[in-house]
Image: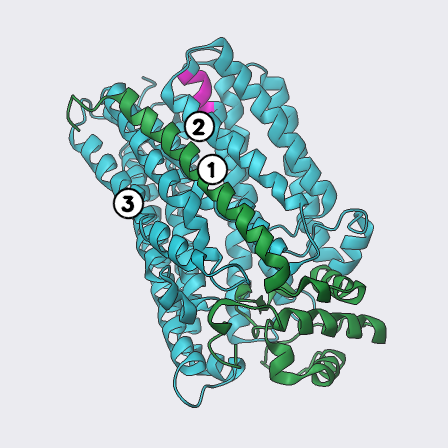
Amino acid sequence: MSETFTKSMARNIFYGGAVFFFLLFLALTFDTVQSVPKRSHSEGVTDSVIRGKHIWETRDCIGCHTLLGEGAYFAPELGNVYKRRGGEFIKAWIRAQPTGAPGRRQMPQFNLTDQQLDDLVNFLKWTSEINTTRNWPPNIEG
Amino acid sequence: MQYKSQAVAKPYFIAAIGLFVGQILFGLIMGYQYVVGDFLFPAIPFNVARMVHTNLLIVWILFGFMGAAYYLIPEEAETELFSPKLAWIMFWIFLVAGALTIVGYLAVPYATLAKMTGNDILATMGREFLEQPLPTKVGIVIVALAFLFNISMTVLKGRKTSISLVLLLGLWGLAIFFLFSFYNPSNLVMDKYFWWWTVHLWVEGVWELILGAMLAFVLIKITGVDREVIEKWLYIIIAMTLITGIIGTGHHYFWIGTPEYWQWFGSVFSALEPIPFFMMTVFAFNMVNRRRREHPNKAATLWALGTSVMAFLGAGVWGFLHTLSPVNFYTHGTQITAAHGHLSFYGAYAMVNLTMISYAMPMLRGRSANSGSAQIMEMWSFWLMTVSMVFITLFLTAAGILQIWLQRMGTTPLGFMAAQDQVMLFYWLREITGFVFLIGLVLYIWSFFCKKGTAQAAA
């Protein structure tokens, strides 16, 4: 780089750029946070949904599945599983694990109670109703 | 080694390499579970193996960063470390806490671990990469603060160079953005939004400052190029990093229930994120071409150049590949993401640590470079690991493209598992290549014990 462009100029671009774009990021964050309740139907976040999220987290479901595309890629997307399979299927599926089919991917048995299964399904139902851009995922298979 | 207290870096580097081995072994287990689904089930289910794989990665990279700081800061500040004793205490706390966490993942069901460790008091667990129990998270904060206190005090009492300032900024940012791991709102959209404040603002933000500072330090040492020139490059690279990378967080806000404007902000700014990585490649090659000395450590030079190239390919090119929102609509949450994750983490953060270790470890062992035969072995390990990681990435990319085609496009999309069965060939190829990577890693460790030939005397 030429001699006219000095280290202190580079340093000023760094500090100026970082501060400016972080402030812009904060402003966008403020706007986003305002819009989340409406887009996610936050009135639907019931105690049951909150308990369901807790089940989701404490069984580390994200370690195999994706949820709105984030997580591991070993097992199906679950952001829209409620629409794909329905609540009763989800509960029956979880109860029936592991399949024990030789050589196939296995899901652990979590011994969830009926109440816990209902909470988990309510969480997945609420998640499937979040207003995602272009209605992601691209199709029902997730 | 110019300052006695730099020696404390050595256990950090050794621990980093040890945990790296663990990470790769669990990666091989997962790779095998991809093709033989019930392998090791129910002893080690996939999600447990993945937690161990990714958490070991994070912990060994952090060990590497801390070791690098303990080596680099005294030399830059031209003074002994504020407290080597504190560094030793933190080393053992971090190592024991890390080991206990991994044992916890493997020994008890995750839900039991959550109950045992107070997740009901403050629920932070069960989110990708932030699976650590509460006591571990608190431990990370304590270790990070003690570490930052130690190196900040060292810089305060010594010479303040741009490299140490940038490194400090990066490390302070690392600690601050980790605090978002304690924030877990019950609304999933909010949870995901701020989860990225730790994950994205680490790897596409402040960690790049740390990477840049480490690379700049090694380049000054091995090329002898004027500090003013190198630091000017460093500032301009990290300026571009934050100018593109902060708003670039928006590429994670496409499909999680956040407003539409993130499609534009995220696409445009993250499409510019390769620029700082490309500058880093130009920078590294330029400095080595303009070198004013022939440093006997050829292996470290290779690692430094390799880091700049592979970080550009992994983070820059493979990131750009799926960062535009019309593309990401189809690629989001597929093997494409896994491909990018592997090459970017290896190319940027694994390799910069191996660069630093390659440069510093001989010094810490009382010589300016290892013997010729040890260096040749190390360079073989460089090529084996790097080339196999490129192929792992290519195989995952192929699997991803096929997966998208079968599962997300066309009029009769396949279900997830049916699509997985169709791409099995690429998972087999990935797993075989993983063993080549392991051979490279074994060779790398072996190079530390290579006795043939004579080492270069200390400079």
What residue do we see at 51% from left, 31% from top? B171
The green-coloured chain is labelled: A
Disc 2 crowd, CA 10 A, few/some/many (<14, 14-19, 20+)? many
Mark 3 or 2, which is nearer the eye?
3
Question: Dot 1 lies on which element?
Answer: helix
Image location of residue B440, percent across then percent down: 39, 51
**Which span of residues is magenta-colored?**
B71-76
The answer, for residue B75, to whether it is visible in the render is yes
What amino acid does circle 2 point to? Leu
Kindly identify which residue carries mark 2.
Answer: B167
Secondary structure character of the magenta stretch overall: helix
What amino acid does circle 3 point to? Ile
Label 2 in the same subunit as label 1: no
Subunit of label 1: A
Question: Dot 2 lies on which element?
Answer: helix
Q: Splitting the image into 4 quarters, where does residue A4 fall?
A: top left
